[in-house]
Amino acid sequence: MADAEIQSRFAPPNKQLEPDVVAELQSMMRLHDLPAEDLYYKWDSYCIKLDLDAQDVSLRNVRGLKQSIQDELDKSSHRQQAQQVRTERKVNATPKAGGADVFGMLDGLVPSTPATGASKLSRGPGSASAARRRIDTPKGGAPGSSPAGGMRDQLNAMHNVPISSFSDRTNPGEVIEILNDQLPAAEAPMAPYAEPRIKLAASSDQKKMAYRPLAMKLSEASEILDDRIDDFLALVQEHHQLEDSAFGNAAAQSTTEIVAVGRIASDSLEGKLNAASLVLETSRRTGMGFRVPLRTEKIRAWSCFPGQIVALRGSNATGNEFVVNEVLEIPLLPNAASSAATLEGVKEKLRGGPDAMDSDAEPAPLSIIFASGPYTADDNLDYEPLHALCSQAADSYADALVLTGPFLDVDHPLIATGDFDLPDEANHDPDTATMATVFRYLVAPAFTRLASANPHLTVVLVPSVRDLLAKHVSWPQDTIPRKELGLPKSVRIVTNPMTLSVNEVVLGVSSQDVLYELRAEELAPPKNSVSAAAAGGDLMSRLVKYLVEQRHYFPLWPAADRARLPKTGTEEGVATGAVLDVSYLKLGEMVNVRPDVMLVPSALPPFARVVESVLAVNPGYLSKRKGAGTYARMTLYPPKTDGEHGDRMLSHKVFHRARVEIVRI
C-alpha cells in the first residue's frame, strides 16, 4: 500500500520510480513518521527552493531532501534548547501563600483567583451565569437562529440594487481589452500534452517570509526606512556618477546647490498629500531624520506619493524650505535575460514531449490564465465564478493558472457573521470544524476536478492578508499551510509577494491592491492639464511605473487610511487594509531584475500595459460584490534566439511575444 501511494505521488507520468529511490522515501517516512502526502509537500517545496524539476525523482535529489529535513530538525532542536536555557535563567517572583491576593479583594472576580467562603458566586437562577446564558440566547427565534439578523435581506436592500444571479450575467466570455492583438490567440490542443510544459522555480527566498508577525519594534522599523533612503542614495550616485561632495542635507541652510535623497511625506497626519503639505524626509545619516518643506514651482510636470524615494537637485537658502530645480532620474533594475542555450531548452520543453509534434515545427504558445479574488459574490458561498474559471482552464487545456487571494475572505459578509452552511456531502463535526474544513468543501473541489480534467496544468495560489486561512496576518506574508485543505498536488501555494520563474519568464505577483492606494494618495497634476500630459497622462501606466522605479511591490508609506478604501459588505463596512509589517518591508522588494510580467490585482478597472519593458496585468476581481467580474488570459509565444548560441545573454522581450486579453467570466 505504501509503495503504491509513493509511486502515485512521486513517479513521473507513465514511469516507475527506481527501487533505491522508493526505499529511501520509505526510510524517511519511517524515520520522521510522515505520511506520503506530507513527504510529497516537503519534496515540492524543496524543488522550488533549489530550482529542481519535481519530475526528476533521482536518488541524489531524494538524499538531498533527506539531508534538508534533518538540517531543519537540528535547527529546531537547537532553538528549543536555547529557549529552555533562557527560561531556566529567569527569576520568578515569590508566590504568596495559598495563591490568593493580600486582602482577598480579587476573590471570585478573576478566573484564576479561587473564591473563598461567603464570597463564592451563586449558581442559582438569579446568578451572573444565568444572566449570561440569557444574554447569549438569540432573541425572537429558535436557539439555532442566525445572529446575522437576515444578512441576505440587508444585502438585497443595500443601495436598493438587487444582487444578480451568476447564471444571469451579461456577455460571459466577452473580451473587453486586448494587448498585442496582432498576435493570434492560443488554440486548445486536441488532447492534453504528454508532459507539463512549465517548470516553476522560486526567485524569492520563501524561508525569510516565515518571520514572527505582530512583533514589530520601533527601532527596527526606523532602521528599515532609513536604510532604504541610503540604498537609493548609493544607486543615484553610481548612476549619475556624482562625487560625495555633491550630496548634502536638504534641511540645512545653504546657498550651494546640492543633491538631496529622501522620502516624500506629508506634514499633516490627516488628509491627502498636496503641494502645501509636501515635505522631504531625510535619513538619520544624511540629514538627522529632519523633514523640510519642498517648493516645486520650477518643476514643469511631476507626480509623487508618500513613501516615494526621490533625488532632488536644489538649495535651501533660507533654512525654511528646499527649492527644487531638478528631479534626478532613479535608475531601473536591469531587464531579465537568459542565455541562448537556456532559451533553446525552453522551446524544446514547449513541445510537450518527444512525440507531441514535428521537431522542426514551431512549438505551440503557452496559455496562462490570471485571476484575483474574491471568487464569490456577497450573497452566497457557491464560488460559481471560480468553478466557471476552472472549467475554462480545463476545456482550453491551459498550461498554468495563477490565482491571488482572498479565497476565504474575512471581508465577506457571510463569513464575517458565520451565517452559512457547508454542503450536505460534508461529513464533519460542527464542534471540531475549522476554516480549513470550509475551504476543503467549498473551494478545493474546483481544483480537484480541474486536476482530473487537465492533469499537467500548474496552479499557483498566492494568499492575501484578507484570507482567513492565513496565520500570517501581515504583509509581506508567508504561505498558507496546505495539509488539511484537500488540494491536489498540482496546486502550489507561494508567499505574498512572490517572484517566480515560469520557464524563462520572470513573474512578479503581489495580492496587495497597491494601485488603488497609490491612486488615492498620489499628488499629480489635474487630469486634462498640460502638466498631466507631460507627467504621463495614462493613470494606470503611471501607477505601474511607480512600482518599477521604486523596485518594490508596495512602495507607499504610510498605507492609505482604511476609511478611504472600497467599502465591504460587512456590518462595519471598513476594509482590512494593507496590514504592513515595516520591519520586514525589504522582503517586498523586486529581486535582482525587473519582472517580465507583473500581476497587480486591483479594484481599479482591469488592464494590460507595457511599462518600462514590464508587462503589467490587472485581471480585475473574478467576482464583484453584486455580480460577475473579469480575468486575464495570456498567450505567450516561444522566445526567439535569432541564430545565437551558447552562453550569450538575450533579453526575454515578453512584451513583444505575449497577447493578453481581459475577459468577462
Image (cartoon, helix red, strand yellow):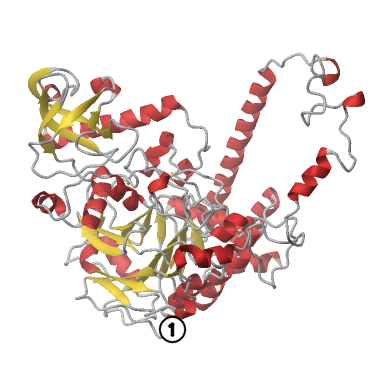
User: The residue tagged with tag 1: helix, strand or loop?
Assistant: loop
Q: Is residue 238 left or right of residue 135?
A: left
Measured as percent of width and height from the top left, residue 170 is found at 39, 79
Front one among 243 and 512:
512
Against 435, residue 553 (above or below) is above
Front one among 401 and 381:
381
- Residue 472 seen from this side: yes
Please state, as top left, top right, bottom left or bottom right, where the N terminus lies in the image.
bottom right
The residue labelled by disc 1 is: 191
Q: What residue is drawn where x is 44% and y is 47%?
A: 577
Measured as percent of width and height from the top left, residue 119 is found at 87, 26
Front one among 506 and 315:
315
Amino acid residing under circle 1: Ala
Against 402, residue 167 (above or below) is below
Q: Is residue 427 left or right of residue 172?
A: right
Q: What residue is drawn where x is 44% and y is 50%?
A: 496
Measured as percent of width and height from the top left, residue 12 is found at 52, 69
